[in-house]
Amino acid sequence: LQAFPEYQFYFVGGGPRKAEVTEFIERHTLTNCVSMDYVPREQLSEVLSAADLHVVTMGEEYVGVVHPSKVYPLLHLKKPFVYVGSQDSALGNLLLHADLDWQVDHGDVEGFMTVLERVKAGMDSQTERILQGLSQTYRKQNSLEKLLSFF
């Protein structure tokens, strides 16, 4: 991350590896990295909207067990993100079928940087249309209606 001083990286939230991330930033004196705690729900939209690119991660051992729900507010806001995790997951499949090339495997630094550079260059009209469609598909009202249809 030091090799990319033009980028500012924010690690927001908590979780079991929060201390590890914070310690890594401090140990390597990463001046373009900031570790922040969770933000109150009232400020969440503001924080999500401020970023140019979000990173969503999921360990291989969690495929089929959990799902990174943080992606849905990003889809609603039409914000680009890179998914670091298995293509053989629900999110990997969503991106594949939506024709969004934003998934990279763990350890694929070159792939990550490719996505970063693409986002930096700006989204094309096709990507904007895809995000608009996904925003409508995964909006809160649609999800609630689908859930209630089971009862």
Image (cartoon, grey):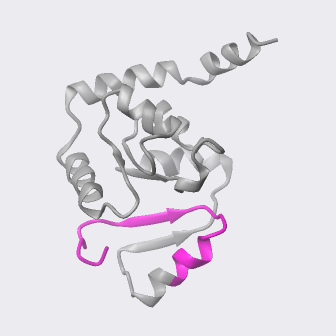
Could you tell me which residue is drawn at 26 percent across and 50 percent down? 115
The image quadrant of residue 12 is bottom right
Give the image location of residue 36, x and y in percent.
Answer: 56, 68
Q: Quadrant of the C terminus?
A: top right
Q: Measured along the vertical axis of the image, is residue 114 above or below residue 135? A: below
Q: Measured along the vertical axis of the image, is residue 73 above or below residue 17? A: above
Could you tell me which residue is drawn at 64 percent across and 64 percent down? 14
Q: Measured along the vertical axis of the image, is residue 94 above or below residue 45? A: above
- Horizontal side, residue 149 vs residue 140: left or right: right
The image quadrant of residue 116 is bottom left
The question of residue 45 being in magenta is answered with no
Q: How many marks?
A: 0
Give the image location of residue 20, x and y in percent.
Answer: 56, 78
Give the image location of residue 78, x and y in percent.
Answer: 41, 33
- Residue at the farthest right position: 151
The question of residue 11 being in magenta is answered with yes
- Magenta range is 1-23
Could you tell me which residue is drawn at 36 percent across and 42 percent down? 80
Could you tell me which residue is drawn at 40 percent across and 39 percent down? 79
Most foreground residue, 10 or 116: 116
Q: Quadrant of the N terminus?
A: bottom left
- Horizontal side, residue 125 vs residue 93: left or right: left
Most foreground residue, 30 or 66: 66
Give the image location of residue 150, x and y in percent.
Answer: 76, 13
Most foreground residue, 78 or 96: 96
- Residue at the farthest left position: 121
